[in-house]
């Protein structure tokens, strides 16, 4: 039976391959202190060789059911396809949202998710910023020295994410509240870093314009549904109201911290 009030604790960019054992224990205790029924993870959980382990460990340690999407770091040292195949086989306590139909959390609230990708459709496409993704994810190996090939691949990955999101939304039951979990901010205005929008050189790799288009269209066609998007990737906290019924919350580093290895709880929602 579902609890009368459900508590959903959201974390993002926890990069659990970095923390020392003590920081990891403190992180699990911080989640437990929120007394969540479910935990939402919006990507960059770890890397390809440990993401399954950590997702499973969070569920086991906290006793909460985990819903998650993958971020770019979760594919490091492997391929997108291989990691996605792995996470679809995780035991029932943890669910990769792109692999399942929208989840009805109660009679008012629905949850769905897509991974998202920085899809090189805004900002400075001649950006000098190079991402580790292109050297650590095998899908990029053929284009790592080819800026045009990279942009083409990123735009295709973004379009694939938009297609999956469109399919999920089409299957979502009517809801007063819709939570969408994704890794990459779907609007440039949601690419927060240090309290401001990321600069144009970062935006091509920090924004999934394709999923933003799908969300904006859905919000316009469903004015009675309140949509909350939970994302991360930029490691800067902020809130962007994309439409009266569409709010994007971007999670980030804890205050005064600018390094991996300090996973925190972003917030807990009650409904
Ligand atoms: Fe991250
Ligand atoms: Fe990321």
Image (cartoon, rainbow, N blue to C red):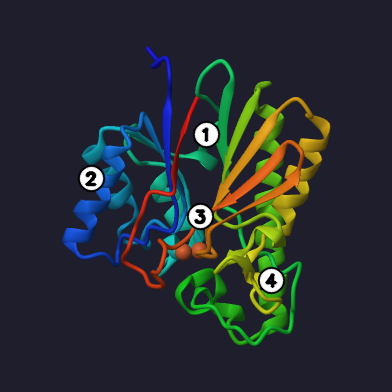
Q: Position of residue 94 (x, y in %)?
A: 36, 37
Q: Position of residue 164 (x, y in %)?
A: 65, 44
Compared to residue 162, the image places residue 13 above or below, namely below
Q: Earlier in the sequence, mark 3 or mark 2?
A: 2
Classify 10 Å Cα crowding around label 1: few (below 14), some (14-19), many (20 and above): few
Query: Along the line of sight, which residue is nearer the eye, 145 or 68?
Result: 68
Q: Kindly check if marks 4 and 2 are in contact, taking CB atoms under 8 A apart as contact.
A: no
Determine whether the beta carbon of the residue marked 1 sits less than 8 angstroms from the nearest atom of ligand 2. Answer: no
> Which type of secondary structure does the marked residue at label 3 adopt?
loop
Q: Position of residue 16 (x, y in %)?
A: 31, 60
Q: Earlier in the sequence, mark 3 or mark 1?
A: 1
Cα gap from disc 4 to disc 3, whole angstroms: 19 Å
Q: Earlier in the sequence, mark 4 or mark 2?
A: 2
Residue 8 showing in the rendered view: yes
Q: Which residue is mark 3?
A: 251
Q: Kindly check if marks 3 and 2 are in contact, taking CB atoms under 8 A apart as contact.
A: no
Mark carried by residue 264: none
Cα gap from disc 3 to disc 2, whole angstroms: 19 Å
Compared to residue 28, the image places residue 153 above or below, namely below
Identify the residue shown where x is 68% and y is 21%: 174
Q: Kindly check if marks 3 and 1 are in contact, taking CB atoms under 8 A apart as contact.
A: no
Q: Position of residue 30 (x, y in %)?
A: 28, 46
Q: Which residue is mark 2?
A: 29
Q: Which residue is mark 4?
A: 204
């Amino acid at each position: 039976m579902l609890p009368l009030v459900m508590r959903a604790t959201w974390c993002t960019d926890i990069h659990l391959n970095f923390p020392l054992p003590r920081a990891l224990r403190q992180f699990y205790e911080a989640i437990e202190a929120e007394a969540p029924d479910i935990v939402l993870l919006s990507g960059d959980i770890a890397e390809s060789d440990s993401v399954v382990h950590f997702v499973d460990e969070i569920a086991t340690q906290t006793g909460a059911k985990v819903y998650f999407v993958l971020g770019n770091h979760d594919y490091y040292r492997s391929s997108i396809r291989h990691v996605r195949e792995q996470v679809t086989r995780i035991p029932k306590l943890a669910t990769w949202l792109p692999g399942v139909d929208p989840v009805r959390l109660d009679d008012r609230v629905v949850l769905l998710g897509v991974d998202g990708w920085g899809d090189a459709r805004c900002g400075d496409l001649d950006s000098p910023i190079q991402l580790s993704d292109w050297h650590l994810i095998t899908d990029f190996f053929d284009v790592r020295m080819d800026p045009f090939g990279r942009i083409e691949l990123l735009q295709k990955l973004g379009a694939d994410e938009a297609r999956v999101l469109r399919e999920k939304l089409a299957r979502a039951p009517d809801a007063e509240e819709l939570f969408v979990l994704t890794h990459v901010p779907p609007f440039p205005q949601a690419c927060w870093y240090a309290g401001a929008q990321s600069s144009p050189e970062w935006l091509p790799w920090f924004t999934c314009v394709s999923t933003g288009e799908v969300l904006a269209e859905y919000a316009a066609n469903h004015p009675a549904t309140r949509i909350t998007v939970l994302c991360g990737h930029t490691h800067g906290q902020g809130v962007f109201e994309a439409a009266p019924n569409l709010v994007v919350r971007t999670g980030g580093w804890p205050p005064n911290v600018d390094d991996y290895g300090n996973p925190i709880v972003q917030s807990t929602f009650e409904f």
